[in-house]
Amino acid sequence: MRLDARPLGILLIVIGAVLAMIAVLITWRTVDRFRVNWALTDWHGMVMLNDLPGQRSAARDAGLLWPGHPAVALAAIDLAAPGAAEQLAAIPAAGSAASAREAATAINAALNGKEVTGGGSDVALAKVIARPDGPWPTTDRSSPPFKSTLGAALAARLASAWKAGRADDLRHAAGGLLLLYPRHPDAPELTLICAALDPDAERSLQAIPSAGGQIGDAARRIQLARALYALAPESKPLATLAFGGITDPEVLARKRLEEDASLAASSKTPDQVLIRLAQAGRFDLATTLIAKLEPRRQAPFAGMAALTNATLATIPADPRAKPLISRPVTRSGLIAFHITNRFGGSFTDPVVIVIEGKEIPPELVKRMGSLIWSEVAKTGPGDVAIRLGSETLFAERLTF
């Protein structure tokens, strides 16, 4: 029996067309999956950058390409939102999606202050998110956690340790994030944290300069180095990075005040720096800082500005600006006292000390801010009068 060539050709063409259509569908589905994976990769990147609009946009793109897929549905949910629990419950729990939904549910509970229940590595890490200052859990090696769960727990641990100044926890969290995300946007900063807090002093000594050099923004590098120096004050490379090698505590405190004052003009809270400057008696820096502020922001500090190298003639009318004197402290051959006001200011008017009617020579009267002292040729009781300019602040009998 022979088949007619024409019907056989038509049959082969139909079969070829069907196979071609199947191939096209498979290829198209593969392309769709690739595009979904690409969108989910973008979503992970936005999560690392804490870019919520970017996360939602990437999740929306993935949802249009593969609606209903558990991974896409999970990416579209804001786990910090109170209503996320209902959205998670609607996701089909089959295969790997079940464990992903369980991990997301635990994170949602942790972020909303609810009790985290269940077992497994992801739930244990979600408890770290809920209480980042607690002990770090031991995860189940046979059931490792999702990368995103581990990353979220490490980030929460890092933030908590930074705020509380827990050096060991800070180093552990920074190192964990670096291992998990080698291309993390803050990888240079995380590297410096690990180098600065390394318990191996020799290794830390070698690593800090290189780690610091990876941070391109000089202001950011110095700010981080100074914060870390508070946790590792014995580190000379860190002191060099933060303060140019200055290690004397008094010089460091003075330099920090000066540099904080120079940066505070662009800050949203310059008052905090101004308070520190007043407490340190640096009204010269305070006045310079106030002058840099916008006019509308200068008004609350007008009284403070008038106290820089103040004189009786220049202090404001505010009663709190008037000079006050502490009770003099005396011993054989010495007298010391403070002249200030309720703002903590100091005065430049001449201080005159009179003992038993005799004025102490001006060159013997020493001053350092509000503190004034002088050697005296007197022992035993005697009448003492102290004047600031023309105003008498003290007149009593003291014993030397």
Image: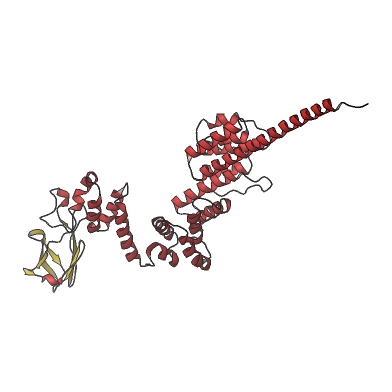
Q: Position of residue 15 (x, y in %)?
A: 78, 29
The front one of 145 and 97 is 97
Q: Is residue 324 left or right of residue 158?
A: left
Q: Is residue 171 left or right of residue 346?
A: right
Q: Quadrant of the C terminus?
A: bottom left
Q: Quadrant of residue 398 in the image? A: bottom left
Question: Residue sitting at 59 percent across and 35 percent down?
Answer: 72
How many numbered circles does the render carry? 0
The front one of 122 and 76 is 76
Q: Quadrant of the N terminus?
A: top right
Q: Position of residue 356 (x, y in %)?
A: 7, 68
Q: Position of residue 347 (x, y in %)?
A: 16, 59
Q: Is residue 365 left or right of residue 196?
A: left
**Res 183 visible:** yes
Q: Quadrant of residue 127 in the image? A: top right
Q: Is residue 20 above or below residue 322?
A: above
Q: Is residue 80 above or below residue 1?
A: below
Q: Is residue 342 left or right of residue 111?
A: left
Question: Residue sitting at 69 percent across and 46 percent down?
Answer: 142
Q: Quadrant of residue 380 in the image? A: bottom left
The front one of 397 and 242 is 242
Residue found farthest to the right: 1
**Res 329 visible:** no
Question: Residue sitting at 38 percent across and 56 percent down?
Answer: 219
Q: Position of residue 321 (x, y in %)?
A: 16, 51
* Colouring convention used in this rendered image of the protein: secondary structure
Residue found farthest to the bottom: 377
